[in-house]
Image (cartoon, helix red, strand yellow):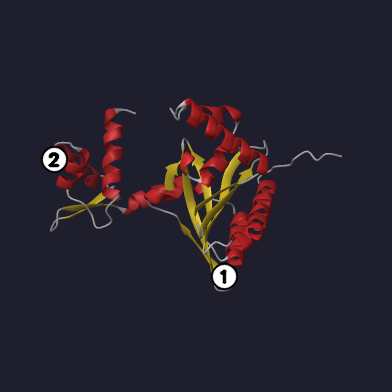
Amino acid sequence: MSVAVHRISEVLDAVASNPQGTTASEVASQLKVGRQAIVRLLDSMVLEGIAKKDELTKRYRLSLKTYDWGTRAVAPYLPPFYLRQELANLAREVRHPVFYCILDASDVVTLERTDGLGDGSVTIPNSGRVARTHWSQSPWGKALVAFAQPEAREALLMAEHAGADELHELRAQLESIRRQGYAEHQTTADRMTMAAPILNGDGFTSGAIAIGINNYSPDLHDDFLRRLLSVATHASYGAGYSPILAH
């Protein structure tokens, strides 16, 4: 990435991180860059319609032009209508949030969250920094990588720069996920996350579905898992996956 593009990316991220707006001095301090250079860049963004400046507070905010860009950029990655219906049904059944995730380089992006709401459901973009995490830090990330193309999976593993023991453990986790067809992680006694991959026509992951379970009870584990795997299987068929069945 060129220096100029990298700097613009940093400034955009800094301004987007504060919905109340941020001053040039705050951005300069955060990025450890001279204030005048940041002022010139921010004012250029204002002239291009990318940002807006409140002349009273001297605070900059991103304009709705960036919203338009983001909406168009994310459109190809959103779940199709049939899958949205499946996710809505799952959220209503389990009464816990259901997430749709994709792999983006070495990060997992959680695009949408669906919650059951009475007899219906509501789906919202899962925005914010929590929506993007390294693949190794979540069960849905590991589910995505476990079923990725072998070359891509190996490249992601080798990029970990982990010790031999840690790398061996990570490989073992991914192999276990491939065997059982899902990933899960219990953070506390009453919090559990389950994730299952969506497979494309080549049999590799195209996305993942995750359930975030609060007030978790082991008695309900098999029921949650059955419902999750059912939706993931239907979604995989919809994405073109057609396993060869033994006769």
Q: Is residue 208 above or below residue 160?
A: below
Residue 12, horizontal then vertical, whole percent: 29, 44
Mark 1 or mark 2: name the one nearer the start of the chain: 2
Total numbered circles: 2
Q: Amino acid at mark 2?
A: Arg
Most extreme residue toward the right is: 247
Q: Secondary structure at mark 2?
A: helix
Residue 179, horizontal then vertical, whole percent: 67, 39
- Residue 35's disc is 2
Residue, disc 1: 120
Front residue of 127/42: it is: 127
* Residue under the point 33% across and 54% down: 64
* Residue under the point 44% across and 55% down: 126
Report whether residue 243 is seen. yes
Q: Quadrant of the N terminus?
A: top left
Front residue of 144/219: it is: 219
Residue 119, horizontal then vertical, whole percent: 58, 73
